[in-house]
Amino acid sequence: MAYFTRKTFQFFKELNAHNERPWFEANKHRYIEHVRDPFLAFIRAVDKDLKKISPHYYGDDRTNGGSLFRIYRDVRFSKDKTPYKPWAGARFKHLDSGTQTAPTFYLHIQPGHNFMGCGIWHPPAPVMNGIREFIHNNPRSWQLFKNKKKFRETFNFGGDSLKRPPRGFPKDDPLIEDLKRKDFVVSTQLTNQQVLADDFNKTFIQHCKIAAPMVDYLCAALDLEF
């Protein structure tokens, strides 16, 4: 049985057109039935297989405070005052993520813009510089996973980068473009058909396996177990 269905996408398409509280309250039961509960079931299924990749990563199927992002937007500091996210996302976190910055696996469900990714988004400056130092001092391991055919064919690096080399690093470093990164993340697009398939949890886990060497590398840079 598929976790997500066309009703999942239909809900988000309608929410995108009617992003207001009265509409959502009238259709909240659809959100629970076609988005929240299927995603929680997906998280439970993925948790078991993710632990086979790394016993230090997990999926938390709680309705609040778990892996699944809340659908409610924080509009306090945003010009966009629409109250709901027209997408659903979940983070599969490291056991130590409550006490320090750690890389994550991530899944984003949105009609026509589904993707999964991994890494560290917007790390604080000390963490960012620590990762750069680690890459500079351990270039071979970084290049080893980055140059693997499956990794290159599946993932693309994203996020922001400095325009100039970071202070303290040689301009002619072979990995200077990676050292300039402010985010250490990769992602891959997923089709609607993949998301709606009965074996989508296996597709997600397969992508996690391909990305695992990068997550392992970032964990090593932060003295975390993988």
Image (spheres, helix red, strand yellow):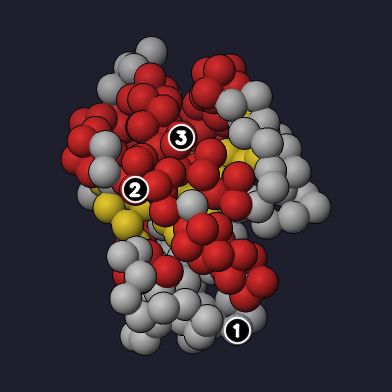
Earlier sequence position, callout 3 versus callout 2: 2
The amino acid sitting under disc 2 is Gln
| Rendered position, 75 above or below 152 | below
Direction from residue 14 to residue 23 in the image, left or right: right
Q: Is the residue marked by circle 2 packed among few (<14), some (14-19), or many (20+) residues within 10 Å?
A: few
124 to 66, vertically: above or below: below
- Please give left or right for residue 17 compared with residue 168 in the image: left
Q: Dot 1: few (<14), some (14–19), or many (≥20) neighbours within 10 Å?
A: few
Q: Quadrant of the C terminus?
A: top right
- Spatial separation of the CA atoms under disc 1 and disc 2: 39 Å
**Label 3 crowding class (10 Å Cα cut-off): few <14, some 14-19, many 20+?**
many
Residue 21, relative to residue 62: is it above or below?
Answer: below
Labels 3 & 2 near each other (Cβ < 8 A): no
- Tags 1 and 2 touching, CB below 8 Å: no
Q: Earlier in the sequence, mark 1 or mark 2?
A: 1
Which sits in the foreground, 42 or 148? 148
Residue position for label 1:
77
**Which mark sits nearer the N-terminus, 1 or 3?**
1
x and y percentages locating residue 210 in the rendered image: 36, 32
Residue 7 in percent (x, y) is at 34, 35
Q: Residue furthest right?
A: 99
Q: Is residue 56 visible?
A: yes
* Residue 73 visible to the viewer: no
Q: Report the front residue among 26 and 194.
A: 194
On the image, the x and y values in percent for residue 164 come to 37, 86
Tell me if residue 182 comes above or below residue 87 in the rendering. below
Identify the residue at image location x=37%, y=52%.
186
Residue 183 on image: x %, y %: 46, 65
Instruction: Name the mark on residue 212.
Output: 3
